[in-house]
Amino acid sequence: MTQAQKMQQDLNGTQIIKLDYPINIVTSAGQQQLTELSVRRVTVGDLRFGAHLKTDAEQELAMMSRITGLIPEDLDLLDLADYQKLQLFFRQTTD
Protein backbone atom coordinates (compact mmCIF):
# COMPACT_ATOMS: atom_id res chain seq x y z
CA MET A 1 0.00 0.00 0.00
CA THR A 2 1.31 3.40 -0.94
CA GLN A 3 1.49 6.33 1.45
CA ALA A 4 -1.29 8.06 -0.51
CA GLN A 5 -3.56 5.02 -0.21
CA LYS A 6 -2.86 4.86 3.53
CA MET A 7 -3.74 8.54 3.93
CA GLN A 8 -6.98 8.06 1.95
CA GLN A 9 -7.98 5.12 4.14
CA ASP A 10 -7.29 7.13 7.28
CA LEU A 11 -9.36 10.06 5.98
CA ASN A 12 -12.44 8.05 5.11
CA GLY A 13 -12.15 5.58 8.00
CA THR A 14 -11.73 2.44 5.94
CA GLN A 15 -9.20 -0.32 6.20
CA ILE A 16 -8.31 -3.27 4.00
CA ILE A 17 -8.19 -6.64 5.73
CA LYS A 18 -6.29 -9.25 3.74
CA LEU A 19 -7.83 -12.70 3.97
CA ASP A 20 -5.52 -15.60 4.72
CA TYR A 21 -8.22 -17.88 3.32
CA PRO A 22 -9.99 -16.27 0.33
CA ILE A 23 -13.69 -16.95 -0.14
CA ASN A 24 -15.90 -17.24 -3.20
CA ILE A 25 -19.11 -15.23 -3.16
CA VAL A 26 -21.93 -14.94 -5.67
CA THR A 27 -22.55 -11.48 -7.10
CA SER A 28 -24.80 -10.15 -9.84
CA ALA A 29 -21.83 -10.54 -12.19
CA GLY A 30 -21.28 -14.18 -11.20
CA GLN A 31 -18.89 -15.80 -8.79
CA GLN A 32 -16.12 -13.65 -7.32
CA GLN A 33 -13.14 -14.58 -5.17
CA LEU A 34 -12.45 -12.21 -2.28
CA THR A 35 -8.86 -12.00 -1.12
CA GLU A 36 -9.44 -8.90 1.01
CA LEU A 37 -12.24 -6.98 2.68
CA SER A 38 -12.72 -3.23 2.64
CA VAL A 39 -14.05 -2.35 6.07
CA ARG A 40 -15.34 1.02 7.24
CA ARG A 41 -15.62 2.39 10.74
CA VAL A 42 -18.76 1.62 12.75
CA THR A 43 -21.43 4.33 12.94
CA VAL A 44 -24.24 4.94 15.41
CA GLY A 45 -26.62 3.82 12.68
CA ASP A 46 -24.85 0.44 12.61
CA LEU A 47 -25.42 0.05 16.34
CA ARG A 48 -29.07 1.01 16.04
CA PHE A 49 -29.59 -1.34 13.09
CA GLY A 50 -28.63 -4.41 15.13
CA ALA A 51 -30.09 -3.37 18.47
CA HIS A 52 -33.35 -5.29 17.92
CA LEU A 53 -31.57 -8.61 17.41
CA LYS A 54 -31.71 -11.01 20.34
CA THR A 55 -28.18 -12.34 20.75
CA ASP A 56 -24.77 -10.70 20.80
CA ALA A 57 -23.67 -12.97 17.94
CA GLU A 58 -26.60 -11.86 15.75
CA GLN A 59 -25.91 -8.21 16.54
CA GLU A 60 -22.22 -8.59 15.73
CA LEU A 61 -22.89 -10.34 12.43
CA ALA A 62 -25.40 -7.65 11.43
CA MET A 63 -22.85 -4.92 12.12
CA MET A 64 -20.06 -6.84 10.36
CA SER A 65 -22.34 -7.19 7.35
CA ARG A 66 -23.00 -3.46 7.26
CA ILE A 67 -19.36 -2.38 7.63
CA THR A 68 -18.10 -4.82 4.98
CA GLY A 69 -21.00 -4.62 2.53
CA LEU A 70 -21.30 -8.40 2.58
CA ILE A 71 -24.44 -10.34 3.35
CA PRO A 72 -24.40 -12.52 6.49
CA GLU A 73 -24.27 -15.68 4.35
CA ASP A 74 -21.01 -14.43 2.82
CA LEU A 75 -19.59 -13.80 6.29
CA ASP A 76 -20.45 -17.43 7.13
CA LEU A 77 -17.84 -18.46 4.54
CA LEU A 78 -14.98 -16.69 6.32
CA ASP A 79 -12.36 -18.80 8.01
CA LEU A 80 -12.36 -18.19 11.75
CA ALA A 81 -8.86 -16.67 11.60
CA ASP A 82 -10.04 -14.09 9.07
CA TYR A 83 -13.21 -13.41 11.04
CA GLN A 84 -11.06 -12.73 14.10
CA LYS A 85 -9.16 -10.08 12.10
CA LEU A 86 -12.52 -8.47 11.34
CA GLN A 87 -13.47 -8.63 15.03
CA LEU A 88 -10.17 -6.99 15.98
CA PHE A 89 -10.84 -4.10 13.58
CA PHE A 90 -14.36 -3.79 15.00
CA ARG A 91 -13.10 -3.67 18.59
CA GLN A 92 -10.39 -1.13 17.77
CA THR A 93 -12.90 1.23 16.16
CA THR A 94 -15.40 1.00 19.00
CA ASP A 95 -12.95 1.50 21.89
Image (tube, helix red, strand yellow):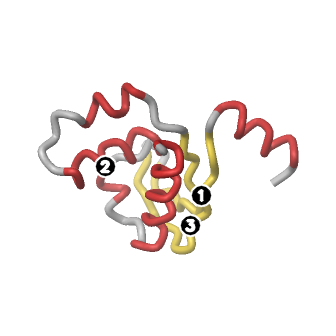
Q: Earlier in the sequence, mark 2 or mark 3?
A: 3
Instruction: Left or right? Give the position of 79 relative to 10.
Output: left
Question: Foreground: 26 or 45?
Answer: 45
Q: Find the residue positioned furthest to the right.
A: 3
Residue that badge 3 annotates: 19
Give x and y (percent) for residue 70: 41, 46
Q: Position of residue 25 (x, y in %)?
A: 43, 57
Badge 1, how many Cα within 10 Å: few under 14, some, many 20+? some
Image quarter where the N terminus lies is bottom right
Check disc 3: other Cα within 10 Å, few if <14, some if 14-19, many if 20+. Answer: some
Q: Nearer the viewer, mark 2 or mark 1?
A: 2
In the rendered view, tell whether residue 16 sits above or below residue 4: below
What's the residue at 44%, 66% (across, down)?
84
Secondary structure of the residue carrying numbered label 3: strand
Q: Secondary structure at mark 1?
A: strand
In the visual, does 84 lie left or right of 39?
Answer: left
Instruction: Name the quadrant containing residue 39.
Output: top right
Amino acid type for the residue under numbered disc 1: Ile
**Nearest-to-viewer mark from 2 and 3:** 2
Residue corresponding to mark 1: 17
Which residue is disc 2 drawn over? Answer: 60
Tell me which amino acid carries mark 3.
Leu
Residue 92 placement (x, y as % from top left) = 53, 50
Sequence-first disc among 2 and 1 = 1
Q: Residue at left 45%, top 30%?
A: 43
Dot 2: element:
helix
The answer for how far apart the CA atoms under marks 2 and 3 are is: 19 Å
Q: Amino acid at mark 2?
A: Glu
Residue at image x 46%, y 73%?
A: 81
**Do the residues under discs 3 and 1 have CB atoms within 8 angstroms?**
yes
Cβ atoms at labels 2 and 3 below 8 Å apart? no
Q: Residue furthest left?
A: 54
